[in-house]
Amino acid sequence: MRLSVLSTKHLNRLGIAVFLACTLLPLAAGLAYALAYSFGLAGALSHGFTTEHWVAVLVARETWYSLVLSVGIAAAVVILATILAMSVVLYWGDRLDRGLPGFLLYLPLAVPPLAAAFLTFQWLGKSGLLTRAGVALGWIADLDQAPEWINDPWHIGVMVTLVALTAPFFIVLFLQYRRAENLPQLMQVARTLGASEKQTVWQVAAPVLLRRALPNLGLGAIFLFGAYEAPLLLGRQSPRMISVLIAQKFRKFNLSDVPQAYTLTLLYAGAVGLAAWWIFRKMKRLSGVGNIVILLLLRVGALNAQGPLDGYMKGKGNLDIAVSFSGNSSNKFHGANDEIYDLEYRGSLLSLFAEYGLTDNFDLVSVGSYVFTPTQDGLQDGGLFAKYRFWNASLRKGYRFHAIGGLGLAFPLSDYEPTANGALGTKAVAAPARLILQLETPPGFFVNLTGGFNWRFDQPSEADIAAVQQERPDFQPVQPANYATFLAKIGFPAAHYYLDAWFEWQYTKGGSDYVPDVPDLPQLYGVSYRQIGGTAYYSDEGRMGYYLSGGYILNGRNVSQMLRVTGGLVFKINTGKK
């Protein structure tokens, strides 16, 4: 019985993974290609890194006219459809739950947008059915006096079509919330207490429905923002909604418009992504699950495992930029003396990495990160680093040996609260020093040994200490402890791909320890751990690549048994190229 439960659980996880791989990965790959195309790094017109396509799009008036028009139409349609749907549900809700009206309600949902646009054209065009009826009844003298509702400046035909398609969906949505909230009983209570029918409908029932449906209305606005068929057939060609503008940029005979089309696509995706993120952020329910110590690993060195300093030099004038997104999860927390606690953590990390070769033997590195947790989001830690290759020797039989030294400074990028439940990090300020030794073999395999020491310069603030002392009056802070690190890595770089596997060890002597249900500062904990992981990278044309990496904390002291999975894009730019 136990085996079957585990198998079902694993199959569910596998199914979710396959679903995400089939839905999110193609989308991410498409956006990555669009980003490369817009900067001149991919496609038939690529001639090296350039921002001219972005400048052309951002300074063009039609870009902003299209964005404003799309937002305006989406907002107007949502408002009109909401008023119409809410009026129908509040006044005729009981009749819609059964019989022919309930059946007819779902028919408009089956009409494709293209067919709806043609129906609108047949009814509202200059020679449409409404105009002909007006002429027959004597309301309109001739067709020249008929109002312009198709291809008109106010996009009336577009909005009529979109409202006709959206309102039935909102009616169904409001009906579901009407049942879930027991709205008929609530309205009856309001009438019993003396509320008029108008007050009962618009001051009691309407706010309940609107509050429940607000996130879905926002998602509906996002969908309408990208409407295509109705604006294409019924709207004007200038200004155009953003979806029509993008499509026409792709289809024109002028090939120079294609990079601009990809740029507009990224602007559209960014606007939709920000709107969706804001909506889901408002929908998110904050929970008290978790503990301040869960996020001890959310610092630059730990989550990136190998850290920002590796055994390869970029070369003079070469710039690498990597954008990555990590998913992190843990169910166990390792305290001092091999104690293990059931503490759950789920979170994500958006990271930006850049490395530039000032010379063939001297590189500058910068990193930054943004954390998403169930309780709060925000900028976390970053750092600036430098590395110098002081020994580059050719050995016998084609072997090569490199010795690199690195220094840097890691610091918090925002004034987050390390004492809060679900804190973004430990607010540590550290100066890492690294000695990197790398041996490369003739077939291409390499062995990397990296040793380092990290000096801690941060001190807990008086406000953070006072916050802990309010619940624990005897609390006395200790000095944040320095720590040592060691990394062993083997790998194989090839023309179009790269693979490695590594083991990392961190040791901290001193510092305080986590005690369950005792208020403390995670900034002062001594963190030690052993971690394994690996990286796979692929690049087709050399200027852009994709990578997938992972890491797993085996055990340690004051550390979560964290599983990390990271996916990212790498852009390689030669700034010295003419």
Image (cartoon, rainbow, N blue to C red):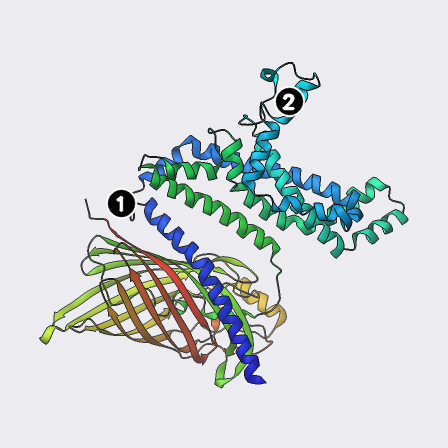
Nearest to N terminus: mark 1 or mark 2: 1
Q: Are marks 1 and 2 in contact (CB under 8 Å)?
A: no
**Residue 55 rendering spot, x and y as whole percentages:** 35, 37
Q: CA distance from mark 1 to mark 2?
A: 54 Å
Q: Kindly identify the residue that appears in the image at 57 percent across and 84 percent down.
A: 2
In the image, what residue occupies the spot 66% across and 18% down? 135
The amino acid on which the numbered mark 1 sits, given as a three-letter code, is Ser
Residue named by callout 2: 132
Q: Residue furthest left?
A: 396
**What secondary structure is marked by label 1?**
loop
Q: Nearer the viewer, residue 245 or 387?
A: 245
Q: Is residue 573 above or below residue 400?
A: above
Residue 46 tag number:
1
Q: Hey, what amino acid is under mark 2?
A: Arg
Asked whether residue 404 is in view, the answer is yes
Q: Quadrant of residue 27?
A: bottom left
Counting from the top left corner in percent of width and height, residue 341 is at 55, 80
Q: Is residue 227 above or below residue 306?
A: above
